[in-house]
Amino acid sequence: MKVLLYAGSERLISKSGIGQAMRHQKKALELLNIPHTANHHEDFDIVHINTIFPNSLMMSWWAKQKGKKVVYYAHSTMEDFRNSFIGSNWLAPLFKKWITFCYNRADIIITPTDYARQILSSYRLNPPIFSLSNGIDTSFFRPTTAARNRFRKKYQISEQDKVILSVGHFMERKGILDFIELARQMPEYRFYWFGYTPLKLVPAKVKHAMNQNIPNLYFPGYINRQEIRDAYCGSDLFLFLTHEETEGIVLLEALAAKTPVLVRDIPIYNKWLTNGKTVYKAKHFDQFKSMINGMLAGELGDLTENGYKLALEKDIKKIGEKLLELYQF
């Protein structure tokens, strides 16, 4: 068995969670010694597709014509497309029709969580749908003092400063508006949002919020994998304010790095993240303020070991073993 990890239009998604998922898939196959390639001119038995661009659709059609098995990894839903870019809400119904057409070209569909699988099941897709985490490289995203020191030195952060971190595109869906307002109302902490989105795609209200003069709020932009690991290790709290996700790879990264985590209490996290056991959760703005203060003051228990154990359950080697089973479905 040889797998083609199709990387069409990789440049467009290399800095996103999908790009990270593809890197995880590659490493998982390497750990299990499963032959794979990114070159579609080589012979292969299975094509594993992660994107919904037209060239990915053409690859699925071409592979079917050649008698190859097509595995579509469904990272996207209409629900998490909304409140993303300019015009995304207006385009959402068309986006749903497009991804339904793409996913229906598969022999099997894989999506990161049961929550995402339930959403996709409502789309009346023909292929069977399985849930399998994107996984996390726990050998890389692990806490070290050296990583913490590098981050703090680079950004001139003292050990007395409390750092609140988030990672993602500049999207309303990702909770960036609340993040900015929390920074404005909590000047005693330093807020860092890592990630980048071309500003021409960012809605006006998000750009307006980002342009406020808030001295303790920082947007350093996109940083590489090593630097983001250092940021997790160097931060005192990972704040994930997303309103909708299919999983959230950055959340897994934070758990693996033993960074204290506070998430928005949304349906996707009802079952596999337990409030007060693996992470802390909040629903409303004032609750976030209260929880942040409690966590950073040490008034709430340290859950990082439990979160780390959860990350270990989603280590990419374990995910790779389950992926191999699905390839053989």
Image: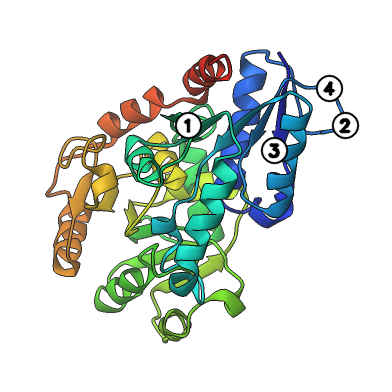
Instruction: Give yes or no for contact between labels 4 and 1 (Cβ–Cβ under 8 Å).
Output: no
For the residues labelled 2 and 4, the Cα–Cα distance comes to 7 Å
Residue 192 found in image quarter: bottom left
Mark 1 neighbour class, 10 Å CA radius: few under 14, some 14 to 19, many 20 or more: many
Give the foreground label among 2 and 1: 2
- Residue labelled with disc 1: 135
| First along the sequence among labels 4 and 1 | 4
Give the foreground label among 3 and 2: 3
| First along the sequence among labels 1 and 3 | 3
Badge 2 amino acid: His
Instruction: Give yes or no for contact between labels 3 and 2 (Cβ–Cβ under 8 Å).
Output: no
Give the foreground label among 4 and 1: 4
Badge 1 amino acid: Gly
- Is 283 displayed left or right of 257 in the figure? left
- Residue labelled with disc 3: 60
Q: Which mark is residue 43?
A: 4
For the residues labelled 1 and 3, the Cα–Cα distance comes to 24 Å
- Is 329 displayed left or right of 209 in the figure? right
Badge 4 amino acid: Asp
